[in-house]
Amino acid sequence: MPISETVISEAVARYDRERDRYIKLASRVADLCRGAVVEDNAVRAQVTSRTKTVKSFEGKLRRFSRRADKNFATVDDVFAQIGDFAGVRIATYRPEDEARVAEAVEMLFCGSDGGAIDIDLKDKLKPAAGQFYRATHCQVHLPENDLVGNYENLRGASCEIQICSMMAHVWNEIEHDIGYKPEGEGPSDAERGLLEALGHLTRAGDAAITRLLAANIARMAMQTGDFADVHDFVARMRPYFPDADLSVNAGLAFDEALALDLVSIDKIRARLGDDALSPAIAAPKIQAFNAYLDEQGLSDLALNPASADLFTIAMLEADVDAIVANHAGGRGKGRPPRIFYLARAYKEFAGKQPATDQVV
């Protein structure tokens, strides 16, 4: 049954009234993705957000009204089934980072019932058939602890996060406008042929970017002196932790290293000793601290022994008082950063160790 004109007009009017809410949601989700997903995990990516315009929404409903599989009997049906009023895109430099980003998104947000988010890997890659669409679609809600203050009215509103490589994004967007929303009778043979040629170029571009970044990492690993940025930090620390994915939680480790003036490998060795660069020494310390966190009901703070947390534990052991002082009272806007809660818990943990085993 086609969507009635009454439902279309009432849905459009409702969205016009509520659009500011979705603008706020898209902006908040994008900010969280930039920080906790991209920066904290040292992923090279661009995060953008958008909110569907009223005109675009009306056009979508009118296209749906011509499809037998789209049955919206009421305005509530429309808002329950359309999930892209607010949208965020995370375009990674490398396609290899897409899965890591999706995992971080899954940990950061929740579904409509507070449980797991909906994830849909739309991998339609069939070059022989001229198909090159590839992206991961995540339907997310803000978790309860984010629905406070100015964001309290976002409860129940969902945002679509699309994850793909930058090169895939080029093809996806152009194909969407020419193929998915075609004017007239659809793409001509010439258009389809050029879309296919573009698809092959974007795949070649993905491969070239991956090789380029690998060469960049190899060069940075040979550098000396102060770390230039978090990517330089990860590249130069990686030889000491070869079995860990140092990009994970690298943002926290790098930011705290800068705050403690541990701005180079030489300074790390001079202040913390070679043990700070030993995964064999760090892993059991993480295990003991995580066990304590679990006993205290703080398992959400647990360190990851296959990540840059292998270095974070060394900083906690050596300079926990300085770390607590650096973030005392949660200076700045919003809640204190995760490192503050980690340092506070670690200080309590260290104080409960036998005198011969104290780490602080």
Image (cartoon, rainbow, N blue to C red):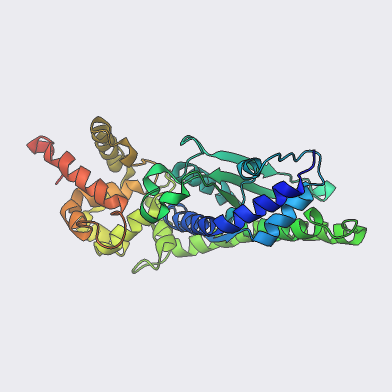
Q: Residue furthest top?
A: 295
Residue 306, located in which quarter of the rendered image? top left
The structure residue drawn at horizontal position 36% and vertical position 66%, both measured from the top left corner, is 227
Percent x, y of residue 193:
87, 58
Q: How many badges with numbers are in the image? A: 0
The structure residue drawn at horizontal position 78% and vertical position 46%, both measured from the top left corner, is 65
Residue 18, located in which quarter of the rendered image? bottom right
Percent x, y of residue 56:
69, 59
Percent x, y of residue 69:
78, 38
Residue 185, located in which quarter of the rendered image? bottom right
Percent x, y of residue 11:
65, 50
User: Is residue 146 at least partly visible in the picture?
Assistant: yes
Q: 222 or 17, which is in the foreground?
A: 17
Q: Residue furthest left?
A: 355
Left or right, 203 with respect to 84, comes to right
Q: Quadrant of the N terminus?
A: top right
Q: 267 or 182, which is in the foreground?
A: 182
User: Is 271 rendered above or below residue 350?
Assistant: below
User: Is 230 rendered above or below residue 246?
Assistant: below
User: Is residue 132 at least partly visible in the picture?
Assistant: no
Left or right, 202 with respect to 46, comes to right
